[in-house]
Image (tube, rainbow, N blue to C red):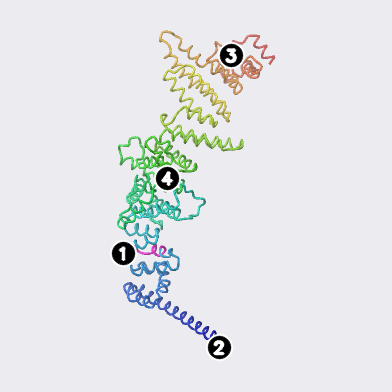
Amino acid sequence: EPVRDNSAGSAGRDKQQSRFIDLAHGHFQMLAGVCIDFCVVTRRLDLLFGPVFDCFKFAQYVSVFFDVLEPYVLNEKLDYIAPEAMTFFIDHCKAMNDLAIVERCLLHMNVTFMDFDTILSLLRDNGMYTALLHVYGRGLDDFATPLAELFEALFDAADSCNAKTYRRPDGIPKNLFEEYGYKAMMYIQFCLQGKMFPQGTSLEPAEKVQAVRHEVLGFLQEETHAAPPTMRKRGSANSSMSRRSTRKMLHPYLRLLIALDTRALLETLSIFFDNPDVTREDVQEFGRHSDGLCPDCQEITSILSHIIMPENDESRPGALSTEMDLPQESRDAFLDFVATYLLKGIISVSVPITMNILTRMSSLVMESNTTAHIVAAQQKAQARVLELLEALPRNSYDHKKALRIVEDAGLNRAALLLHRESLMALLQGGASQDVIKHHFCSSIDCYLRDNDRDYRALVFDYIKNDCMSSIVDCAARYHEPDSGSGSVHAKDLLKEPIFDKLPDLINLDAVQSTQLIAEVFIEDVEEVISFLDGKENEISLFNFFHAIISGSLTKADPMAGPVLLANLTPAHHQTYLVL
């Protein structure tokens, strides 16, 4: 008997069955729309998630029900889904490989009427932490517990990819450690800004904002790991603690965020540091901090220092045992961060860290590779270093090392500030004349090396006003009151440094130089001329004579001009003509 070909009949039956499925799908889709629309308008949610939902469940068209339901939630026509239906909704989204739908819907729902135990368990088990943070904050008014739960997931992810040595290669999260870490960072930013996560609506009242800030920062500052109550109930944290080491580190929460992205963490913390209410109100609350430092900011800075630069942390012994393998960019970001708030007087740090900051600021000059870039970098670095040195108390940095750092970087005005401070301190302390002369001479050098001619000209005011008055006072202490030699000694202290720089001073401004000689060294005019006598100083000697003989000095100072002119001999006039 010939074999019959049944393929045509089979294809027809498959096509008919497919048509039936499409008709059924369309029928249930229309039915779902009618039922949902009716129940939403009449607010019969008990009917919607009771008999109606049961019918779709029995017919195995739950997916159609949720596909039609989703737009009602996203358009905020429906703000509630019953717990049992929510379980099926999550399973439906998992089957579609799109759990983000659940989170989007939850952000449009009224979470205050939810069964929190059920919904939070579902969110936790499925790793939907954006929705979990939202439900905790909006529904339970709890901002620290969800962060602690997110950190539990972050710890597990960090242990899996070795966060201690992890480096982010680009700006796109590539694994759970990055995904959870940046989510935690963003959540902290919202809390510090006084906003609800993730919508960004404002937290009210103002007292609540401050409470949330301190609650979140207090959690981050914890020295040891402690599993949140919800995790302890489930018994998962202890087993993880025994297997992994990340949780066992000191200050594990801040340490983990530092390993993720130090600069991003510091930018997040700056939201708190920059808030004017923080430094004012907190200092008033903690009156024992009479130095004006904000207690929370200071403690956070100390912890960051302990983690990022443990070798420079003088306040916490044993820091090296928890040292992290951080890149130089992380250390530089921390130093820039600290410098900002040292200038504002909000925090203080150890002397070694201050020295690292000065080195960091000065190093920007070394990185420049052209003359124009070097000049611009010097100006920028000099302004920052000067601002920092003027803001810091003198005992907060190593004076000699700071001087060496700024001099190596060519920051003359910063070096001048340090030399002048040293000179004043040495004069008051009765130091040796050689040391005093060194700083005096170096101060003059700092003026003369400056790129701005107008600034260089200020050296004359510095010598005549600042140095003369201080050195005369110093000389009075070196001699007995009845010796009558105080002024002579003051001139002797000034003589060697000024004579060493005399050619440069004259070439800078011959009139002011001759005026200085008339005021201080009128009895030593011959010695001045002898000092300038030499081929290398011919131009300086000519300028010296010219300022006196041409009458330029007399125009500037009618007293000094004639006096110096009277001290010149015919031989001096002859030398002037020869030159």
How crowded pointer 3 is (Cα within 10 Å; few <14, some 14-19, many 20+) is rated as some
Give the amino acid at mark 3: Val
Give the amino acid at mark 4: Ser
Q: Nearer the viewer, mark 2 or mark 3?
A: 2
Which image quadrant is residue 37 in? bottom left
Q: Nearer the viewer, mark 1 or mark 4?
A: 1
Dot 1 and dot 4 residues touching (CB under 8 Å)? no
Q: Earlier along the polypeptide chain: callout 2 or callout 3? A: 2
Judging depth in this view, the residue of 324 and 469 nearest the camera is: 324
Q: Which residues are magenta?
A: 103-111
Give the amino acid at mark 2: Val
The residue that label 3 is drawn on is 528
How many angstroms separate mark 2 from mark 4 (CA)?
A: 83 Å
Residue 205 place in picture, x, y as percent: 33, 53
The residue that label 4 is drawn on is 270
| Residue 108 falls within the magenta-colored stretch | yes
Q: Helix or strand or loop: what does disc 4 sit on?
A: helix
How many angstroms separate mark 1 from mark 3 (CA)?
A: 95 Å
Q: Earlier along the polypeptide chain: callout 1 or callout 3? A: 1
Dot 4 and dot 3 residues touching (CB under 8 Å)? no
Q: Residue 3: give its label.
A: 2
Horizontal placement of 465 versus 130: left or right? right
The residue that label 1 is drawn on is 115
